[in-house]
Amino acid sequence: MSESGRPITEEEVHAYVDGRLDEDRGMGVSRYLQAHPEAAARVAAYGEQRQALRAAFEFLAAEPVPPSLDLSRLLEERLMRRPSSRWQLVAAVVAALWLGGIGGWLVGRRPPSGLDALAQEAAASYAVYVADKGRPVELAAEQRGDLVRWLTLRLNRPVVPPDLSAAGYRFLGGRLVATGRGAAALFVYESGAGSRLAVFLRPMGSEQSIPIEAADIGDSDGCIWIDNGVGYIVTGAEPYGQLLELSRQVRQQAQARS
Amino acid sequence: MSGVLASIEACVPALRRYAAVLLRNRQDADDMVHDTLVRALGSLHTRREEHEVRPWLFAIMHNLFVSQLRRTRAHASLEAAGELEGPPGGQEERLRWRDLVRALNNLPEEQRSVILLVSVEDLSYAEVARVLGIPIGTVMSRLARAREKLRLAGHGHEEARPNLRRVK
């Protein structure tokens, strides 16, 4: 029995119209239709219908997307919305890290203002890493040399953990952090009472220098400033006055080195 | 590596189109797309391949659409939504467009979704089945019925349509 004589199923008719048959069966259907003008007319009608529907609604998809549906904006709103629990923030950040490059993707579009972005990044790092009881750092204090080399290489400038032992804070270690604006460094300290302190820093865009000011870092207080194009944040559970004093020490040490 | 986000973004125009045709109102449509995107961003942690993004987004939107229908007993409110505004064009084109949209709107909602997702949004039959949460055989039978109804209403059947019908 010839291929053109083999009847085609209703499902094949539609798959043919929608271009979803493989080449072999598509040719089989074509041959069948050549021999059966009535079926061919129906298939032609369906094909025209498909084209007519596509053409009729094309204008709806061709219009520019309104700002309210801009994905980078929706994502920013989502990340900036104050999470009601630390775990929500952790979940959001883990999602962001899993996607990798969210930040890079945002950067090409609508950069949030410099200090706000820095504060958001520090808040996320604080919530995810510093709050981790078991493993807050990637490289511990004993590997200080490796840590300094690693961070210096990735941030493209000398990055040295400040020494806060005189203020009663033991250096635990640090890590590289991914942000929307490239690599950042995180250093973690612990007081004798067990409370943790974070120093977060990364190269900034245009701003070269801004004096120390108060910053809202998630649930904690913090201090933020820019020196020589590098943004710093010191944050922890301590009262603001104490954070300010620690920030001055961090700043002095950095300035002494540069 | 922002592939998933880029894929989501690439789907926004199609989501707006599908929602506008279903809801017959641009503002309601964009509200629904907004809710769809917010939900999608909220479940980014579920690992998803890039090619799955389109059916996933349409499925989110379809669920929103269904629950909205349920909430508002909205077959009535859909009728009240009136008609979608067509593209600019000459009178002849506009009449033809309105004829087609009316014929589409005369289909049962379940058939309308299928024919739009297949013909306009170009989803595969398996993807449509996932979006609508129905077996693939049901997709095919709804598609067949929708196409046949439109054909009998004169679409994809130009010469058979008497010109007199357009003179009002």
Image: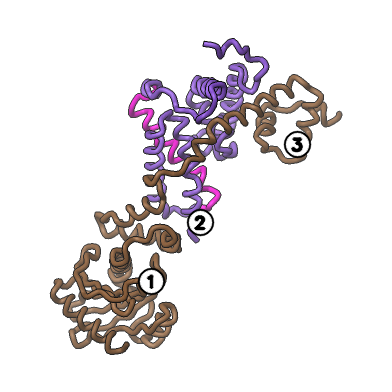
Chain colours: A brown, B purple
Question: Badge 2: few (under 14), some or many (20 or more) residues near its Cα, within 10 Å?
Answer: some
- Residue B107 visible in the picture: no
- Residue A24: x percent and y percent? 77, 39
Q: Label 1 to label 2, Cα distance in Å?
A: 21 Å
Q: Quadrant of the N terminus of chain A?
A: top right
Frontmost residue, A240 versus A137: A240
Can you say whether A47 is above or below A85 in the image? above
The overriding secondary structure of the stretch rendered in magenta is helix
Say which of marks 2 and 3 sits in front. Answer: 2
- Residue A187 image position (x, y, % from top left): 31, 78
Q: Residue at x 32, y 53 (%)?
A: A77
> Could you give the CA–CA distance between mark 2 and mark 3, rounded to whole angstroms?
34 Å
Q: Residues within 10 Å of mark 3 (few under 14, many from 20)?
A: some
Give me the disc on residue A25. Answer: 3
Q: Which mark is residue A189?
A: none
Residue at the disc numbered 1: A177
Give the extent of the magenta segment.
Answer: B49-75
Residue bearing the label numbered 2: B3
Going from N to C along the chain, the mark reached first, 3 or 1, is: 3
